[in-house]
Amino acid sequence: MNKGTIHIENLSIGYPGKGDVKVVASGICADINGGELTCLLGANGVGKSTLLRTLSAFQPKLGGEIRIQGKEIGDYTDKQLSRVISVVLTEKCDIRNMTVTELIGLGRSPYTGFWGTLSKEDRAVVEHSVALVGIPHLAHRMVHTLSDGERQKVMIAKALAQETPVIYLDEPTAFLDFPSKVEMMQLLHHLSRQTDKTIFLSTHDLELALQIADKIWLMDKMNGVTIGTPEDLSLNGNLSNFFARKGIVFDLETGLFRVDNEYTSQIHLVGHGQRYAMVRKALQRNGILANRNVTSDICIETGDLKGDGTFLLHLPGGQEVRVGTIEELLERVKDN
């Protein structure tokens, strides 16, 4: 069982307003575990940044407890906290005349004293952090020559070099293309396992979070924070309710969100695996509800990847048509 690094009890977060205090969320109770990747999801303006800043001690909480490794966050000195929490922010770092290794070395500042001179042990930590993130080939590059994805990996290596049990990340995939987003989320998940650190991040990349995160925090103004595994939140309806809005539905069969289509007809679909999923997707895009549970006069057998590569269409009256592509299948379906 994973150990709870952070314990949160009846936490209230917010900020001062004009003559009063603006409460963003209250009554938050949760544990954030080591060895897990936890993702915070929510719409813009719901308070994700406020929550992250509060958990990072960048702003005070309004009430409740935040205990890190058994100690209340307010009882840490700034120096102690720098050895407990490291933070990777969204903003791009505009740094020139500094190599990747030098920037990662700044993560050792809680240990190096006033002059910041790295000892042999400090350099070994930096080298190990570079290896963990998989960027030895970037070690001697100048930071300003890096791509967004490379620069983000460097900032994660810097956080690792800080040797804290907790790492917070604010929108770590914000400026990345899709393959880089996937790579970044997979890297963070791998690091949580490999290092046993507590990694907590906010993100708008819903689909990736549902596939990669160990725990999901759903944050909205109506219900505050709802917490669970992606699978539990799927089964109990929290994901469906949380993102219930026109044009978006949660697909219980795939565990992911999809565009909500308006259906004008339906077809019984038989099969499994990728071929089943792709035929279902194509039909639903064309306004045809298709799955195993539908009853209709038309049936499609998708087969599997080990079959002959064709699709079998059963039409009313016992007629059967075999086609080789989904495009051709769609044309036959439309004709009938």
Image (cartoon, helix red, strand yellow):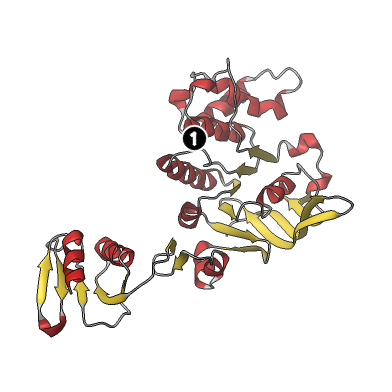
Disc 1 element: helix
Q: Quadrant of the N terminus?
A: bottom right
> Could you tell me residue 78's position as x and y percent?
79, 36
Would residue 306 appear left or right of 214 to someone viewing this image?
Answer: left
**Residue to which mark 1 is pinned:** 133
Q: Residue at x 43, y 70 (%)?
A: 252
The C terminus, quarter of image? bottom left
Q: Is residue 142 above or below residue 163?
A: above
Q: From what the image shows, is residue 88 above or below residue 189?
A: above
Which of 21 and 113 lies nearest the eye of the viewer? 21
Looking at the image, the residue that sits furthest to the right is: 19
What is the crowding at mark 1: few (fewer than 14 residues within 10 Å), some, or many (at least 20)?
many
Is residue 1 or residue 186 the one in the foreground? 186
**Which residue is rendered at x = 70% and y = 20% of the image?**
116
Q: Is residue 131 visible?
A: no
Q: Residue at x 74, y 48 (%)?
A: 54
At label 1, the amino acid type is: Val
Count of picture labels = 1
Q: Position of residue 151 (x, y in %)?
A: 52, 30
Residue 151, compared with residue 186, is above or below; it is: above
Q: Is residue 99 left or right of residue 333?
A: right
Task: Tell me where residue 317 appears, x and y as whole percent.
Answer: 12, 84
Note whether 31 is above or below 185 in the view shown: below
